[in-house]
Image: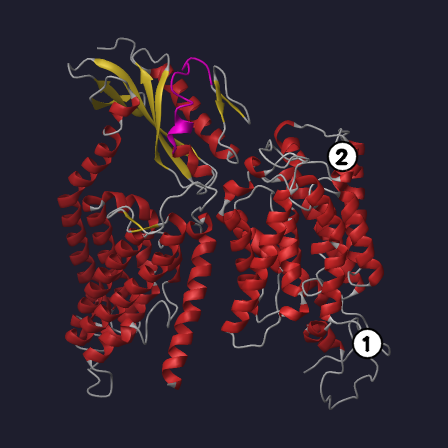
């Protein structure tokens, strides 16, 4: 016994079982709370993204999880799409608000980003995000530099063209995908 | 200059201690101060730089008026205060007399946007003298050009102060219109400014970088006096001309060779900043490589990077490889190579 | 592996040693990755310090308890297994109860697994000493690490944001001012600020230590 593999390794095996059980317990106890935290983080933004919305309900469209924005009476007033993609430094995670017919963008929120402070991270500021509100969702948006954008155009953050282009690209992709796959009849 | 004595080239090409196997050559051929030439002191060289920068200062005062006086004055005073404070902290006697801090402050002030807030030059001077020079052990020990270290620090610390809002239009004193510099305009919308104002200095830009003419006059004085190694700016100008010339042959654009030479801080950097004797190579071949590398980096940053101008980062990057260049280009002494030290 | 008897430092000496004389950040220069990565706010530094302290204490105690079972060629395996388990527990707890911090610190909490402070204490102390000694050592080293992180974060947050515990307590140290008057130093939020601050504080620490020795 002393020289065999089991004889030497039994503490590791016992510890492995013990730790595995402990982790499973911790996971079982905490994962509902963690999932609720994640969902709350998203849901709490919905009233700001869609005028008139008070709460949201997740649903699956295609292979995308989206949130139906509901008003106080429980009727659909818009859609919130989570979307993400590569930014200048790291992944950018966004929430995009769309109106009921998915014809116009109503708002934008940056869930997570790691862009350069002082330059790229200004995509989180209201001033930049408001450039999306009211834009049509039926054609892709484009980025313009150094001037106020017209219809279908978003002015880039000064000195952060790449970050701005990433955000616009993520928005365009997610909106186009949702418009292809969204349920025709909205309850 | 005294600090050159501490340079690895000077010491490795000198007879390497007692060599038991074979006698080391008695003659050394290395650049640097072997002759006791009393006039060639740090103080004289620094005064030369101050004298040579007078055309730049004059143009900047004429173009940017109060803005220029404010930036240059504030950064020189801050650099002197920083030097005095840090040297006192290290319990050394005052080094203000060699005017090196004055030069650092002057170069920093000339490289800051005219309408930048007061703290940009003050923090820049303290960071430049502190992080760029004193932590390495003072003048002669520093790897990087202190003024450029200070400018890099404030440029990353205060990106808003280096945006379009701080580049005022030339010729105005108060309520000046601000806007993109020629290089920013090139990057954003491909505009091409007329060449003559660019050459004279009537363009938007940092306080002292706008005038190619003034940089040339001051730079030629420095080269003739021997304070600046003439090979460095020459190599930079030749490399920049060849590269942009080749580029415009392949892909013609309204931005000519002359535009690239005159715009931004290229000439100011090549003559005044790059030639800092502490942070540039000692050997002749090394100086050619150094200047050419600077031009390549500046052009690459102008064309390929997110920044409109790349003089500061190019200088710092070339400073970083200076010890390597020195090692590569050790000249062969009279009588054959120096025997390897065991 | 038996206890070494009286030749090592006492538990109290070990505890105090971790705080200043053998501070992980300033004396051993260990755990530099989190010292640089999460110290642009006090909240991040405190959370990281707390998580590292929890992992260090649990791992040290557990390793000390099972030290008769450790075999020389399997000990590192057991150390990493133990540390990884407690790090995962800490990570899940943060995600459940401090979701904002968990989001902000991102991968740096799971990366405590490779923090060399912890495996160093398991190897140097816990695998050779009694439970009480190992716990005192872990507390001292863990608090010393947290103090190191918080000292760096103090400089960086005040200069970079103008606040101290800005997210939790909202304490503003430097009043907000228009851009002509004053501006926060963005460089302090970025990685270069972390290197510069660590270097400067390390210098200050060395000066103070040298003064105390010569005095």
Q: Secondary structure at mark 1?
A: loop
Query: Viewed as shown, does residue B77 lie left or right of B3?
Result: left
* Position of B270 relative to B83 (above/below): above
Q: Residue at x 23, y 73 (%)?
A: C137
Chain part drawn in magenta: A125-140
Q: Position of residue C82 (x, y in %)?
A: 23, 61
Asked whether the residues under the numbered discs 1 and 2 touch, taking CB atoms below 8 Å apart as contact, a structural biologist would say no
Q: Position of residue B186 (x, y in %)?
A: 66, 32
Query: Which numbered tag is attached to residue B12?
Result: none
- Mark 1 → mark 2, Cα distance in angstroms: 42 Å
Q: Position of residue A37 (x, y in %)?
A: 21, 37
Residue with the most extreme top position: A185
* Position of A27 relative to C69 (above/below): above
Q: Secondary structure at mark 2?
A: helix
Q: The residue marked by circle 1 belongs to what chain?
A: B
Looking at the image, can residue B106 be seen?
A: yes
Identify the mark nearer the N-term, 1 or 2. 1
């Amino acid at each position: 016994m002393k020289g065999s593999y089991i004889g030497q390794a039994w503490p590791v095996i016992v510890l492995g079982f013990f730790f595995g059980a402990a982790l499973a317990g911790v996971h079982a106890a905490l994962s509902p709370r963690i999932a609720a935290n994640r969902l709350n983080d998203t849901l709490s933004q919905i009233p700001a993204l869609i005028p008139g919305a008070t709460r949201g309900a997740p649903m699956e469209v295609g292979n995308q999880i989206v949130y139906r924005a509901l008003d106080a009476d429980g009727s659909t007033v818009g859609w919130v799409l989570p979307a993400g993609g590569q930014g200048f430094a790291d992944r950018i995670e966004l929430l995009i608000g769309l109106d009921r017919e998915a014809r116009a963008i109503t708002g934008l929120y940056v869930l997570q980003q790691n862009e350069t402070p002082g330059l790229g991270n200004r995509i989180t500021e209201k001033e930049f995000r408001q450039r999306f509100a009211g834009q049509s969702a039926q054609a892709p948006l484009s980025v313009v530099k150094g001037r106020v954008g017209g219809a279908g155009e978003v002015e880039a953050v000064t000195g952060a063209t790449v970050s701005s282009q990433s955000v616009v690209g993520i928005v365009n992709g997610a909106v186009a995908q949702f418009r292809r796959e969204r349920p025709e009849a909205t309850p | 200059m005294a600090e050159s004595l501490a340079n690895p080239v000077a010491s490795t090409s000198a007879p390497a201690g007692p060599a038991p196997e074979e006698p080391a050559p008695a003659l050394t051929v290395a650049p640097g101060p072997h002759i006791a030439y009393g006039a060639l002191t740090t103080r004289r060289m620094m005064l030369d730089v101050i004298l040579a920068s007078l055309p730049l200062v004059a143009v900047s005062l004429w173009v940017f008026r109060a803005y220029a006086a404010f930036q240059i004055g504030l950064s020189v005073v801050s650099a002197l205060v920083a030097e005095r404070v840090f040297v006192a902290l290290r319990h050394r006697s005052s080094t203000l007399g060699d005017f090196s801090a004055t030069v650092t402050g002057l170069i920093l002030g000339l490289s800051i946007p005219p309408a930048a807030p007061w703290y940009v030059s003050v923090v820049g001077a303290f960071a430049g003298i502190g992080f760029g020079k004193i932590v390495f052990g003072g003048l002669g020990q520093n790897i990087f050009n202190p003024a450029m270290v200070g400018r890099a620090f404030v440029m990353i610390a205060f990106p808003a102060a280096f945006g379009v809002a701080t580049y005022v239009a030339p010729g105005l004193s108060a309520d000046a219109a601000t806007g993109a510099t020629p290089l920013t305009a090139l990057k954003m919308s491909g505009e091409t400014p007329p060449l003559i104002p660019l050459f004279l200095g009537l363009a938007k830009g940092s306080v002292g970088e706008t005038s190619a003419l003034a940089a040339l006059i001051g730079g030629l004085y420095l080269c003739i006096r021997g304070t600046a190694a003439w090979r460095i700016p020459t190599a930079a100008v030749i490399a920049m001309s060849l590269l942009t010339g080749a580029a415009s042959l392949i892909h013609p654009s309204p931005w000519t060779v002359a535009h690239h030479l005159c715009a931004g801080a290229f000439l100011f950097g090549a003559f005044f900043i790059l030639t800092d004797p502490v942070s540039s190579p000692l050997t002749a071949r090394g100086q050619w490589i150094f200047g050419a590398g600077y031009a390549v980096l500046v052009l690459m940053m102008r064309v390929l990077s997110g920044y409109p101008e790349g003089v500061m980062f190019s200088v710092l990057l070339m400073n970083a490889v200076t010890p390597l260049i020195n090692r590569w280009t050790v000249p062969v002494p009279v009588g054959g190579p120096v025997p390897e030290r065991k | 592996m038996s206890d070494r008897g009286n030749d090592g430092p006492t538990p109290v000496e070990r505890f105090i040693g971790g705080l200043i004389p053998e501070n992980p950040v300033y004396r051993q220069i260990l755990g530099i990755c989190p010292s640089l990565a999460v110290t642009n706010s006090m909240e991040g530094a405190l959370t990281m310090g707390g998580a590292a302290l929890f992992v260090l204490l649990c791992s040290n105690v557990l390793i000390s308890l099972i030290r008769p079972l450790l075999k020389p060629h399997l000990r590192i395996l057991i150390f990493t297994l133990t540390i990884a388990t407690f790090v995962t527990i800490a990570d899940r707890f943060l995600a459940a109860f401090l979701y904002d911090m968990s989001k902000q610190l991102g991968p740096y909490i799971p990366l405590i697994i490779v923090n060399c402070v912890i495996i160093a204490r398991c190897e140097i102390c816990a695998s050779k000493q009694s439970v009480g000694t190992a716990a005192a050592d872990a507390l001292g080293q863990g608090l010393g690490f947290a103090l190191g992180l918080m000292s760096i974060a103090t400089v960086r947050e005040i200069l970079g944001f103008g606040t101290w515990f800005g997210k939790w307590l909202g304490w503003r140290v430097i009043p907000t001012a228009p851009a002509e008057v004053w501006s926060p130093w963005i460089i302090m939020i970025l990685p270069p600020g972390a290197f510069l601050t660590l270097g400067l504080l390390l210098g200050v620490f060395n000066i103070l230590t040298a003064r105390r020795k010569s005095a």
